[in-house]
Amino acid sequence: MSDRLEVFMFPCLSDNYGFLIHDPIEGLTATIDTPEVPVIEEALNQKGWALTHIINTHHHYDHAGGNLELKKKTNCKIIGPLADKDRIPGIDITIEHGEKFNFGSFDVQAFHTPGHTTGHMVYHFKSQNIAFVGDTIFVMGCGRLFEGTPEQMLKSLDLIMSWPDETLLYCAHEYTQSNAEFAITVDGKNKDLIKRKSEVESMREGSIPTVPTTLDLEKKTNPFLRSDDQEIRLELGMLESTRTEVFAEIRNRKDQF
Ligand SMILES: [Zn+2]
């Protein structure tokens, strides 16, 4: 018996990741979001785990689309952001910003991270140095601003940046290669980024997932976390701009990339 939270990650749909988390002590198993029911069921079978919970990050179909089917089949409980209670199918337990709850023997803290959607939430297992960040932060990228403002998203990313550097971030999509190609256009002199870009290219050639990442690596290579970096500001001609303005410009350029 391990006292670690077990995490099992697997690809879903075209570029999503599915995650099962398992508490070996109390025998609980949750899926973080429900991108693709048959693949989640196969993962459960493979591990021999019975689904007890769904923990949702946000309402998008590739995150909550399998909620009702899995709930019907397993009678699991669905946990999700209060702000999205009318958009997350089958939600049973609503969570607010900063709220702590237990997943079996593990403490989790939920944080509201608006930007990608207004209700988006991330889940931090502090004692495990693990976080499930949905579509808020990606490897060398961040979520598109479908519903929120640059100011909101920057605040959400700042919140994530306040966690310990060694925190493992489980992002919900494999967008890394295209994110790296974009990042180099705004931060081309960054040696850590140049090195990482070639590393992820060879990983992807071998179909190796680039998720999870660490906060430390993201601080060094993710342009969306580096809006105060002088080289990036120089490249954008925005030396005197606010962090929000720089962030908004990077997001805007990525949207057109
Ligand atoms: Zn989304």
Image (spheres, grey):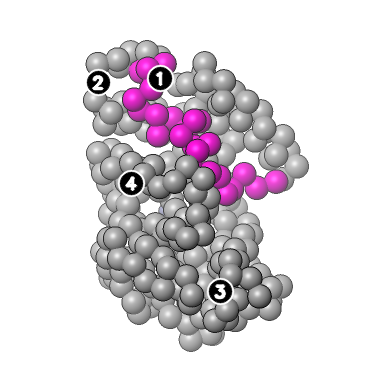
| Mark 4 residue crowding within 10 angstroms, few (<14) / some (14–19) / many (20+) | few
Residue that mark 2 sits on: 241
Q: Earlier in the sequence, mark 1 or mark 2?
A: 1
User: x, y percentage for residue 99?
Assistant: 30, 65
Compared to residue 237, the image places residue 206 above or below, namely below
User: x, y percentage for residue 178?
Assistant: 56, 34
Label 1 is placed on what type of residue?
Ile
Label 3 and label 1: CA atoms lie apart by 42 Å
Q: Are marks 4 and 3 in contact (CB under 8 Å)?
A: no
Residue that mark 3 sits on: 23
Residue that mark 4 sits on: 159
Q: Are marks 2 and 3 in contact (CB under 8 Å)?
A: no
Q: The N terminus is located in which quarter? A: bottom right
Closer-to-camera residue (169/182): 169
Local secondary structure at mark 4: helix
Label 4 is placed on what type of residue?
Leu
- Find the magenta span and give its range: 208-233
Label 1 and label 2: CA atoms lie apart by 12 Å
Q: Is residue 177 left or right of residue 257?
A: right
Compared to residue 106, the image places residue 142 above or below, namely above
Q: Earlier in the sequence, mark 2 or mark 4?
A: 4
| Mark 1 residue crowding within 10 angstroms, few (<14) / some (14–19) / many (20+) | many
Q: Are marks 2 and 4 in contact (CB under 8 Å)?
A: no
Instruction: Based on the picture, tell me whether residue 198 belongs to the magenta stretch.
Output: no
Residue that mark 1 sits on: 232
